[in-house]
Image (cartoon, grey):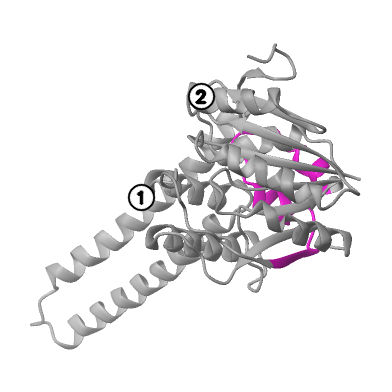
Amino acid sequence: MKISYVIPCYHCAKTLPGVVREIDETMKAMPQYRYEVIMVNDGSGQETEDVIWDLCRRAEGHERHGIGFARNFGQHAALMAGIRRADGDILVCLDDDGQTPASEAGRLIRAIEDGADAAYASYEHKQHSVFRNFGSAVNEWMCEVMLGKPKDLYVSSYFAMRRFIRDEVIRYENSYPYLLGLVLRSTTNIVNVPVNHRARKVGKSGYTLPKLLALWMNGFTAFSIKPLRIGTAFGGITAVCGLIYGIYTVIKKMINPAVPVGFSSLMTAVVVLGGMLMLMVGLAGEYIGRTYISVNAAPQYVIRETTDEAAVK
């Protein structure tokens, strides 16, 4: 049986060697498996790419593959590239910063061998900043509402999947990949596995507020039309409330003609309805724009160089 480790890399020249070394040490205790390590440089510069190429050159007794993007396409695009390159029976995806301990990959692998189609690491104590924890909480809520994720299922960037899930995931060739949505539409046989979560020792998270917002928007619109339905329902409720208020105003004026029609009430209605219309137009435009980009065959990523095609530096 073969295990494929997929690591999306972004400005991780100082941490990636330790992650790969930990994978090697972990797999020495699991000699029944063959394994490979696939590292994808998500447009983070020459330093990271040099480290990846050097690690591939120094591979001993197992496979290491490096992929370099032409520019930054995002974590999920990097995962898609690594997953496409992987040919293991079980795929394990983990971060490049060492916070997701490769030493506990055996727990995820055992969960797959015990019958799960996918296994996500869950953390009792996350060593992220308040900002990242807030972002994770919003992402969890979004996945529950928009993608139908079970409420008791915790999702993270550290997970394992069976080969047939990988085959389903790579069938998605449009822009804006979102891994959890692809996994959820492939299977419901997903489990959580408790693992430790380490504090970051070097650098800081690559997820800024704009990137988190882009990730949330991708989750909102990539695999669900619920935002449109929610907007339609809210618009209908607002229209009914406006109609009731209009009837109330007419009756009140008929009963007491001296009562002035309030300017503030009118402006409130205009602002609420105008804001709702603009929100719905923007949301519809987001769907149309993504459809337009997909029709024009915008790539998920562009590979500049790989260790498989070019001479190792």
Q: Name the residue tied to disc 2.
A: 71
Residue 313 or residue 168, whichever sits in front: 313
Farthest top residue in view: 311
Residue 273, quarter of the rendered image: bottom left
Residue 120, picture quadrant: bottom right
Q: Is residue 224 above or below residue 259?
A: above
Q: Compare marks 2 and 1 and give the one earlier in the sequence.
A: 2
- Residue 131's x, y, as percent? 38, 59
The structure residue drawn at horizontal position 48% and vertical position 42%, both measured from the top left corner, is 286
Q: How many marks?
A: 2
Give residue 16's position: percent from left, percent from top: 57, 38
Within-10-Å neighbours for mark 1: few <14, some 14–19, many 20+: few
- Asked if residue 249 can be seen in this view, the reply is yes
Q: Quadrant of the N terminus?
A: top right
Q: Quick one: 253 or 39, which is closer to the camera?
A: 39
Residue 296 in view of the camera: no
Q: Which mark is residue 278?
A: 1
Q: Mark 2 or mark 1: which is in front?
A: 2
- Label 1: state its secondary structure: helix
- Amino acid type, label 1: Met
Task: State if disc 1 and disc 2 touch (CB < 8 Å).
Answer: no
Residue 149 at x, y = what percent? Answer: 66, 64
Q: Is residue 302 magenta?
A: no
Q: Is residue 186 left or right of residue 133?
A: right
- Name the amino acid, label 2: Arg
Q: Which residues are magenta?
A: 165-193
